[in-house]
Amino acid sequence: MLSRDQSVITIQRELTAFARRARAAAARMHPELSLVSFTLLSHLEDQQGCRATDLAAYYMLDKSTISRQIAGLEKLGFVERISDPDDHRIQVLQLTAAGTAKLAEAAELRRQAFHERLADWAPQDLDRFAEYLLRYNSLAESGR
Amino acid sequence: MLSRDQSVITIQRELTAFARRARAAAARMHPELSLVSFTLLSHLEDQQGCRATDLAAYYMLDKSTISRQIAGLEKLGFVERISDPDDHRIQVLQLTAAGTAKLAEAAELRRQAFHERLADWAPQDLDRFAEYLLRYNSLAESGR
DNA sequence: TCGCGGCGTTGTATTCTACAACCCACCCGT
DNA sequence: ACGGGTGGGTTGTAGAATACAACGCCGCGA
């Protein structure tokens, strides 16, 4: 077994390598939906709609970046803005039917790619890997 | 236990979420060394030097992107080019002493952050997590 | 009512990246 | 040995992503 330190270094290195590739991989898989756009749409689907500020905080992006990304997604017809009747400052962002469909399409492509890469993994290993990632990310969210 | 499909979906989602944050996280941790620069320097250290083309292939970046990144790192004094005497087309890229030091500094910051996040993991889990990531990435490299 | 704070947009500059065109050096077949 | 082909690298150009700052708008509390 690796030492604790060795394990941490490996985890750091391999996660970083993955991150470095993710952008280009997403671009090749579904050129219409960048990695950022994809994650924003996913978040909207998970959360059943949210504000731009929430997206900015969650993904550590500037609000201006989100504003422009959302503007692009709106122009594509994937997102719609719903003004909060109680507070006119707030716009709730929601997926349109087209956005939902597009997201499903991209997600399916990604899912297939992952399935292929993980084809020869034992079910138990997949399960544990998923569990570890969940655990890691949940820590990353709450902290820092 | 999760179904095979559920596990894959979770792995895809969590890896993607990590990737989306990695860039900004790196920028906050060590503003001088972007995520790309950091990974390039790391690769040079691991490989004890390599060609620009190798970096481009490994990280799925265009050779022009690598060329400019390396130019920047060279201007900063972190990388040097060594012409291959046998084949004049080839430049072997190597870390300088300053590059090694800078990389160590950034790596230490990252290592600390990861250690904190993984502080309460059992050694066995760390070991397995590291192993899974290695396995996943090695597949990603060879294929596609 | 006035001012402060939260939400979002717009102006501006920088950086990253891809694609294409190009140069130079090696290689191989004739 | 020469001429095309190939591989490695750089440069021109354009587009996208992003940050920071300034602003407008609205609501809320003193």
Image: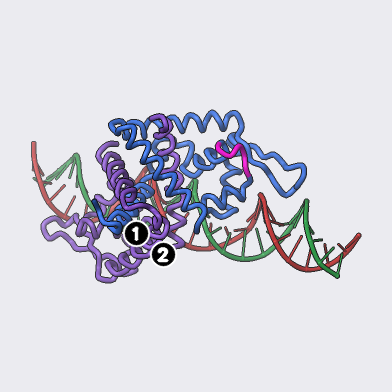
Chain colours: A purple, B blue, C green, D red
Residue visible at 52% across and 53% down in the picture: B142
- Marks 1 and 2 share the same chain: yes
Residues at marks 1 and 2 touching, judged by CB atoms closer than 8 Å: yes
Residue visible at 34% across and 48% down in the picture: A125
Question: Residue B126, relative to residue D15: is it above or below?
Answer: above
Which numbered disc, 1 or 2, marks the residue that appears first in the sequence?
2
Decide if residue A92 is on the left or right side of residue B132. left
The residue that label 1 is drawn on is A38
Give the residue type that dot 1 points to.
Phe
Q: Residue B40's spot in the image, x, y percent?
A: 53, 42
Q: Mark 2 lies on which chain?
A: A
Q: Is residue B129 visible?
A: yes
Give the residue type that dot 2 points to.
His
Residue B109: say if magenta: no
* Corner quadrant of residue A91: bottom left
Q: Nearer the viewer, residue A6 or B106?
A: A6
Q: Give the range drawn in magenta.
A: B46-50
Q: Mark 1 lies on which chain?
A: A
Decide if residue A142 is on the left or right side of residue D5. left
What is the magenta segment's predominant secondary structure?
Answer: loop
Q: Nearer the viewer, residue A47 or D16?
A: A47
The residue that label 2 is drawn on is A30
Q: Residue A107 carries which label?
A: none
Q: Residue B99's spot in the image, x, y percent?
A: 57, 32
Q: Distance between the residues labelled 1 and 2?
A: 9 Å
Q: Residue A124's spot in the image, x, y percent?
A: 31, 49
* Corner quadrant of residue A104: bottom left
